[in-house]
Image (spheres, helix red, strand yellow):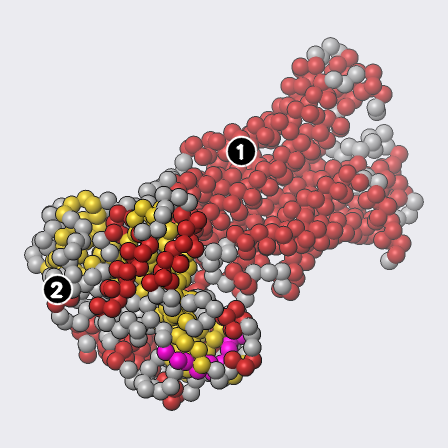
């Protein structure tokens, strides 16, 4: 074994250029593949961090026209009583909570959860305990379970926190437990958990849907069986409560699939792209191995003549390939460590679910090892077969000077054509995604993006327990912030575009309206919101002093909303109502203005969402987002704005503070990630293809040195030799480019869901890519062609 290893090392040492280039090419291929597989493994293959996570499902409401939604609380209660497919069901509702009487007031994202929440997920607390049924009843003492990160950040990681009282929303809560950092809610946002009152008024609500619901399947129950039972339950609810469930049914989905959502298709696409890179890598290394194998024919024939068996020669050749593959794989894993860190940093804004789980764990490293060994075998088979066929008599032949006939050259040329074709496919995909990203970034957001700051606020519900108190607090905050130097204007909205929002089902009142109801974003805003955010008024008026609690209910709608409900008719003076709202005067309101559309779901959203604005004075919510237009760099006023708010209320909790330009940019983070990764893959494939073309042409020049000497001696001019050599490269490049373009015409359909504002068969992209690759590959022909043209005939003839 040691002798064989020494022989292998000596053989590789005789061709150091081949060894170094092979290891480098393999490192790039294995490294990029490992990075992408680490992402795919974390999101699609790795089980969720819950006990028996394959049994967990997400339960949803589904409407034929309005899509999916979470459940109304009363629907959850019916489900918990009547379903038999689950061992337990639980629900959660996000809420903002103010932590006061701490170093600084803070707005935290919390969860109100039902009784069996922690039982369903099966994760034990790090410290203390979770709640018991008696603590989920109205009137019970307030208890809270903290997340480990919050516990360490705000309370110093003290074990003594268990049993202590903290102040949330101006109310005392006893800390009963701390959940480990590994436990997060399915959507990864919560910092603490409180029990929802299971006998409170919310549990009778059937119209408003705001409880995210999860279930654990009973042993032996399949997802399809659970779906069938929920469909029956949904039909029963439609019969019993027709006004609340008209058009609505119940559905269930695998929880891991629900969390990954739209990213599944994109990740599979990236996996396919990196597979193309590995094919190009293998083709490139196989071509290099063929050239080296041809060069070693004489040495192997001599060894065969001296008694070396065909099996020994083949195993040595295969051993060399595996050794190079292992070296390339090891270097690739080191590159992958850097690549994984870069990907995690790129998605640190929370745009990618489960991003904190991406890493080089054991399954990923084993897959990298398997890929490395498979690659080594793949590109080592041809040289091993050639070595096995070596004959001792070949050593005596005059032709044993390094040529091997036309077959190896044809194989290598075919490999290069394939490399070029795959590179064209990846380059076209990268070009389409880049143009799509540019198209997204050029879309008008519908509001001001520069010098605009968004500041999250949450009023303590027990201190600001009525509408008048909330209106007064918001007015004082707006007045204090607007008076700051550098502030041009300020406004307030319930939710912030490009982050999240709440929707309400709305329908037109009276004849002439659009058919049926539709979900629209529903926000309360101050009159200054439209000025601060620069949302243009298209018709009617904005809110004024008369639109207060004593005035008639009014609303401003976006242009898309007006068109959806009223078509070309004038929407001013018309009314909208909420069929899902509790009956009363506030369930219907008059439209007094029409403003421009805001792409609040992000620049990547294909559809313009519906939006309805209500006056903050008529509907003051307990949380909101302060919008501040500045005359200076927006984030430079962060501390001044916080101090102005705390001058109004020293205990006012303040949440995230973000320049709106960053929020807009983050809305295309997924598209930016795909474009960057495809660009990386395409660039790598093009580099490898160019190396392949250079290798074929350079090898051809070396093999035909004597021929070029004869041609020169017979009167051929240097430009004739140059054209002869270049023609070989041109044929390969054009054949590969043509094959690649034809492949693209069918392959680009997989990009349909990821391309916005660009034709999948955009001739500009296809021609630009093909032209760029052709020029780059032809450039690779220049050096060997120039070297051939400058050969001295006498030298060339002596080389044989």
Name the front one of labels 1 and 2: 2
Above-or-below relation of 99 to 616 = below
Highlighted magenta segment, given as a residue range: 171-180
Where does the image place residue 35, in percent across and percent down from the top left?
59, 54
**Is residue 277 in view from this perspective?**
yes
Q: Nearer the viewer, residue 133 or 673?
A: 133
Q: Residue 550: which disc?
A: 2
Q: Nearer the viewer, residue 25 or 312?
A: 25
Where does the image place residue 721, in percent across and percent down from the top left?
69, 18
Q: How many marks?
A: 2
Q: What residue lies at 51% left-to-right and 56% top-to-bottom?
A: 348
- Identify the secondary structure beneath mark 1: helix
Q: Which residue is mark 1?
A: 737
Above-or-below relation of 421 to 572 = above
Q: What residue lies at 60% left-to-right and 51% top-to-bottom?
A: 339
Query: In the rendered structure, which disc, 1 or 2, sits on the residue that comes first in sequence?
Result: 2
Above-or-below relation of 62 to 146 = above
- Structural distance between the alpha carbons of marks 1 and 2: 72 Å
- Taking the view exactly as shown, the residue that stands out farthest to the top is 715
Q: Is 798 situated left or right of 382 in this image?
A: right
Q: Main secondary structure of the magenta part?
A: strand
Q: Is 320 situated left or right of 782 in this image?
A: right
Q: Quadrant of the N terminus?
A: bottom right
**Is residue 600 in view from this perspective?**
no
Q: What residue lies at 83% left-to-right and 31% top-to-bottom?
A: 401
Q: Residue 340: which disc?
A: none
Task: Please say whether residue 175 is one of the residues in the magenta stretch.
Answer: yes
Q: Nearer the viewer, residue 97 or 306?
A: 97
Q: Is 45 situated left or right of 466 in this image?
A: right
């Amino acid at each position: 074994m040691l002798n064989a290893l020494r022989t292998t090392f000596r053989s590789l040492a005789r061709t150091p250029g081949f060894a170094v280039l092979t290891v480098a090419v393999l490192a790039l291929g294995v490294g990029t593949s490992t990075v992408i597989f680490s992402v795919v493994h974390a999101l699609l293959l790795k089980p969720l961090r819950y006990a028996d996570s394959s049994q967990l499902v997400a339960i949803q409401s589904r409407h034929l026209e309005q899509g999916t939604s979470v459940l109304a609380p009363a629907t959850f209660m019916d489900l918990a009583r009547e379903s038999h497919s689950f061992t337990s069901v639980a629900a959660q509702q996000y809420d903002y909570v103010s932590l006061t009487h701490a170093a600084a007031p803070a707005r935290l994202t919390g969860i109100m959860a039902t009784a069996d929440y922690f039982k369903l997920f099966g994760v034990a607390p790090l410290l203390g305990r979770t709640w018991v049924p008696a603590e989920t009843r109205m009137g019970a003492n307030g208890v809270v379970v903290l997340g480990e990160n919050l516990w360490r950040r705000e309370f110093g990681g003290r074990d003594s926190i268990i049993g202590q009282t903290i102040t949330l929303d101006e109310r005392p809560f006893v800390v009963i437990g701390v959940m480990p950092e590994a436990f997060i809610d399915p959507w990864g946002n919560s910092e603490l958990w409180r029990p929802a009152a299971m006998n409170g008024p919310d549990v009778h609500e059937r119209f408003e849907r705001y409880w995210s619901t999860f279930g654990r399947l009973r042993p032996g129950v399949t997802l399809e069986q659970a779906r069938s039972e929920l469909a029956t339950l949904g039909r029963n609810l439609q019969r019993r409560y027709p006004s609340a469930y008209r058009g609505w049914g119940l559905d269930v989905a695998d929880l891991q699939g629900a969390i990954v959502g739209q990213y599944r298709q994109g990740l599979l696409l990236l996996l396919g792209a990196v597979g193309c890179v590995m094919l190009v890598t293998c083709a490139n290394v196989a071509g290099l191995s063929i050239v080296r194998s041809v060069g070693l024919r004489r040495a192997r024939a001599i060894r065969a003549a001296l008694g070396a068996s065909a099996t020994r020669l083949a195993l040595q050749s295969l051993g060399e390939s595996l050794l190079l593959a292992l070296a390339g794989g090891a270097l690739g894993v080191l590159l992958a460590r850097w690549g994984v860190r870069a990907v995690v940093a790129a998605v640190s804004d929370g745009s990618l679910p489960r991003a904190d789980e991406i890493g080089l764990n054991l399954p990923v490293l084993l897959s990298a090892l398997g890929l490395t060994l498979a690659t080594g075998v793949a590109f080592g088979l041809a040289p091993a077969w050639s070595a096995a066929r070596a004959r001792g008599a070949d050593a005596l032949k005059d032709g044993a000077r390094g040529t091997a006939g036309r077959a190896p050259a044809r194989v290598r040329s075919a490999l290069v054509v394939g490399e070029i074709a795959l590179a064209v496919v990846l380059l076209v995909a990268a070009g389409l995604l880049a143009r799509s990203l540019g198209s997204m970034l050029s879309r008008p957001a519908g509001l001001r993006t520069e010098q605009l700051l968004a500041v999250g606020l949450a009023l303590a519900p027990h201190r600001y327990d009525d509408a008048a108190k909330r209106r007064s607090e918001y007015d004082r905050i707006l007045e204090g912030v607007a008076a700051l130097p550098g502030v041009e204007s300020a406004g307030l909205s319930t939710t912030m575009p490009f982050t999240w929002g709440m929707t309400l089902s709305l329908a037109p009142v009276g004849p002439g309206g659009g058919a049926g109801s539709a979900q629209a974003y529903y926000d309360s805003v101050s009159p200054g919101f439209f000025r601060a955010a620069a949302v243009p008024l298209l018709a009617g008026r904005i809110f004024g002093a008369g639109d207060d609690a004593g005035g008639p209910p009014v609303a401003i709608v976006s242009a898309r909303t007006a068109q959806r409900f009223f078509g070309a008719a004038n929407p001013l003076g018309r009314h909208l109502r909420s069929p899902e709202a509790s009956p009363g005067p506030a369930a219907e309101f008059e439209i007094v203005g029409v403003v421009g559309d805001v792409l609040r779901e992000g620049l990547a959203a294909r559809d313009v969402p519906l939006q309805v604005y209500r006056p903050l004075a008529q509907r003051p919510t307990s949380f909101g987002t302060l919008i501040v237009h500045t005359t200076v760099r927006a984030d430079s006023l962060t501390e001044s704005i916080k101090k102005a708010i705390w001058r109004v209320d020293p205990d006012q909790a303040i949440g995230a503070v973000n320049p709106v330009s960053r929020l807009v940019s983050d809305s295309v983070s997924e598209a930016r990630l795909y474009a960057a990764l495809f660009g990386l893959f395409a660039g790598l494939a093009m580099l490898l293809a160019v190396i392949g073309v250079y290798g074929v042409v350079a090898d051809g020049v070396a093999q035909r040195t004597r021929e070029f000497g004869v041609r020169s001696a017979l009167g051929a001019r240097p430009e004739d030799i140059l054209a002869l050599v270049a023609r070989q490269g041109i044929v390969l490049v054009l054949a590969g480019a043509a094959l690649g373009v034809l492949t693209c015409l069918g392959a680009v359909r997989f990009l349909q869901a990821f391309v916005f504002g660009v034709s999948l068969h955009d001739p500009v992209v296809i021609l630009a890519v093909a032209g760029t690759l052709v020029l780059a590959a032809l450039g690779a022909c220049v050096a060997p062609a120039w070297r051939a043209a400058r050969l001295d005939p006498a030298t060339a003839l002596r080389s044989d």
